[in-house]
Image: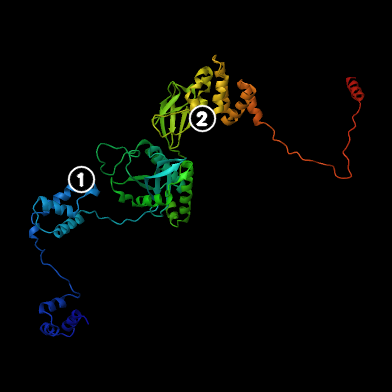
Amino acid sequence: MDTYELVRRSVLVEEMSKREASRQYGVNRRTVTKMAENPVPPGYRLKEPRKKPKMEGFEAKIDELLKWDENEPRKQFRTAFNIFETLRDKHGYEGGYTQVRIYVAERKARQREAFVPLAHLPGEAQADFLEAVAEIGGVRMKVHTFLMVLPLSGVWFMRVYPRENSESFVDGNAAAFRFLGGAPTRIVYDNPAYAVKRGIGPMKGRTREPVLAFSELRSAFLFEAAYAAPAKGNEKGSVERAVGTLRRSLMVPVPQVESFEELNDKILAKATAFKEKSESFAQDAQVFLPLVDYEPCELVSRKADKTSFVRFDTNSYSVPTRFAYRSLLVRGTPFEVRILSAKEQIAVHKRCFGKGRFITELSHYLDLLEKKPRAARTALAVIQAGLPEAFELFRRYVEDGTGVGDLRFVGVLTLAVEYGSERVADALRLAMATGVQEAADVRLLTIRQAEALPATVCMDWKLPSGQRSPTVERPPLSEYTDLLLKEAI
């Protein structure tokens, strides 16, 4: 039996004296007293901290060095050994490294933040953007992915965009709401400039003023927006953890797709499968806010210039020439730019994410080219249309120096908009081979090719045995003459 237990039993149960127990078990009487007073061994206890004579006066210097680190990058903080070397080499410290290491560890432990365990409530969400690399249409590029996570059920939604801006932010939220079947009651965000207005200096407190686009989104769906404190990723830990997990599972290896739509469809299929398997998603869905008919966008007023361009987000987009010099509305979404005049949509362009680019549509300039046909050779809209080589060959074929040939070429451009450039190119090759120059004749060739009857299948056919083909007896023409005379009478 353990000596500790034997001593306690002898003294407390068998009423042996402490002197006798000390003699019998060979234990000091003071130790016997401690054994009797403590159910278990209390361990070694110091009545007062050990003295560290060689550390006297250096604790304040260590505190000073650690305080300087507060303004430095976290990955470049001083280590205990760095501090030991500084004290030894510059301040005459003669003690050992161990004492410095223990003091630094205790000092840093007191500075570390403690956290309160939290429970996830139904219907609440967290959102963030993450960056990844994808190959879209053969071009390797950095893409920006909007991610929303429901902490309670773990259900997530992800959508990839070319840029991280206000349009993609509000569009990602609205798309997530449609995917979930309702809007979460409360969503925690970071503090990006495209969502909240930034002042001068670091952000303080929890009050934020949203930008117009985000304010409209909140007004439409009526959810509560909460904002994490700067550099406090733990306040939206669910989405922060999901960022790494989903990037590794969905974007590794680097996806190779033809368009953003294809990539988003693949991600949506996986998100839908996960949502359908989630057993606790129903708890979230019960408290969701209802969906509303709302399509987010950035709506701005712009004036078309003399070349029928409207500027939006550092790029210029064409409109029909009849709208030159007029004030128009530009409706920008993450992937499209729609231009309206008095609620009438007059142009739709695929959004360009370059800088200082000019995006044209050939049909917008045809009416003006009919008045200025000589401009067709170097017109930006014609060059950007990507027409087949047959169009340039035909332009040279009909060019006569008088402008008549240029007008014929403009007529052919009109056919390209109406029938498609490939069909018209086939007609142009036939026109040049047969000496046709007029646009009207090229139109007939285009229509004739489109309406050509398919070749029929020919095969030998014989009458069944024992039968002969029918014969048709033709009446004499005199009978027709008699019929006409009777009709006249």
Q: Is residue 91 left or right of residue 429?
A: left
Q: Is residue 32 above or below residue 368?
A: below
Who comes first in sequence, dot 2 or dot 1?
1
**Residue 290 can be seen in this image:** no
Q: Nearer the viewer, residue 478 or 151?
A: 478
Q: Residue, x 61% and y 27% (percent of image)?
A: 429
> Which quadrant holds the C terminus?
top right
Question: Which element carries disc 2, helix, strand or loop?
Answer: loop
The label on residue 71 is: 1
Q: Nearer the viewer, residue 485 or 286?
A: 485
Q: Is residue 318 above or below residue 53?
A: above
Q: Nearer the viewer, residue 394 or 281?
A: 394
Residue lying farthest front?
Answer: 433
For mark 2, what is the residue? 386
Q: Residue, x 51% and y 26% (percent of image)?
A: 362
Front label number (2 vs 1): 2
**Residue type at the position of mark 1:** Asn
Q: Residue, x 60% and y 21% (percent of image)?
A: 439
Mark 2 closeness class: few <14, some 14–19, many ≥20 residues within 10 Å: few
Q: Position of residue 153 (x, y in %)?
A: 41, 55
Q: Position of residue 127 (x, y in %)?
A: 37, 46
Q: Residue, x 29% and y 37% (percent of image)?
A: 198
Circle 2/circle 1 CB separation < 8 Å: no
Residue 160, picture quadrant: top left
